[in-house]
């Protein structure tokens, strides 16, 4: 599984960004096999969980810090997941990573495949 995240950038506080993560899946496997997650890492801090969704995208787990502001979705026909981020705050500034695994979890250790990350910077 190869993951390519995109959509980061610089935005003012209160603004919005939409991140995308496109997955390339090896033959014999399907995108719906994988739980997909978003994590972020700010400078000097540990990587933290943001959101995760199971194979259908029907149930999504969010970190309390983003609940009500961020929306994760997945399009299985396009092998892509999205993270719509609204009402952004300076504390949302981080490198955002998408990840794929087989266990629906907040723990980064449960995700075997990681994208390269995309920088999100929110100015005050």
Image: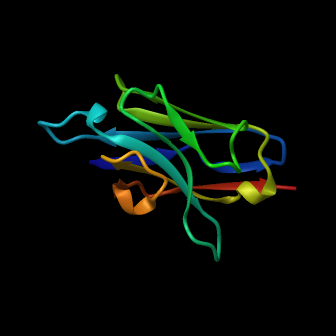
Which residue is drawn at the image coordinates 26% and 36% (left, top)?
33
Q: Is residue 57 left or right of residue 61?
A: left
Residue 114, position as x, y percentages in the image: 38, 56
3 or 111, which is in the foreground?
A: 111
- Residue found at the far top of this picture: 77
Which residue is drawn at the image coordinates 36% and 57% (left, top)?
110
Residue 22, position as x, y percentages in the image: 40, 39
Indicate whether 113 appears above or below 35. below
Q: Is residue 121 left or right of residue 63?
A: right
Which residue is drawn at the image coordinates 79% and 40% (left, top)?
87
Q: In this view, does 12 lie to the left or right of 115?
A: right
Indicate whether 105 appears above or below 47. above
Which residue is drawn at the image coordinates 52% and 35% (left, top)?
60
Location of residue 26 (image quadrant)? top left
Q: How many marks?
A: 0
Q: Which colour scheme is used?
A: rainbow
Location of residue 78 (image quadrant)? top left
Q: Is residue 98 left or right of residue 94?
A: left
Quadrant including the C terminus: bottom right
80 or 61, which is in the foreground?
A: 61
Location of residue 23 (image quadrant)? top left
Residue 48, position as x, y percentages in the image: 57, 61
Residue 17, position as x, y percentages in the image: 67, 39
- Residue found at the far bottom of this picture: 44
- Residue found at the far right of this picture: 124
- Residue found at the far left of this picture: 28
């Amino acid at each position: 599984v190869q993951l390519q995240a995109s959509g980061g950038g610089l935005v003012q506080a209160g603004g919005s960004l939409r991140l995308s993560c496109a997955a390339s899946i090896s033959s014999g496997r399907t995108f719906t096999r994988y739980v997909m997650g978003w994590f972020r890492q700010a400078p000097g801090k540990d990587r933290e969980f943001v959101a995760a969704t199971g194979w259908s995208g029907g149930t999504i787990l969010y970190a309390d810090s983003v609940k009500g502001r961020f929306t994760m979705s997945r399009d299985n026909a396009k092998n892509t997941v999205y993270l719509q981020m609204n009402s952004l705050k300076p504390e949302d500034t981080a490198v955002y990573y998408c990840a794929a695994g087989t266990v629906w979890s907040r723990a980064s250790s449960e995700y075997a495949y990681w994208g390269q990350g995309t920088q999100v910077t929110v100015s005050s």
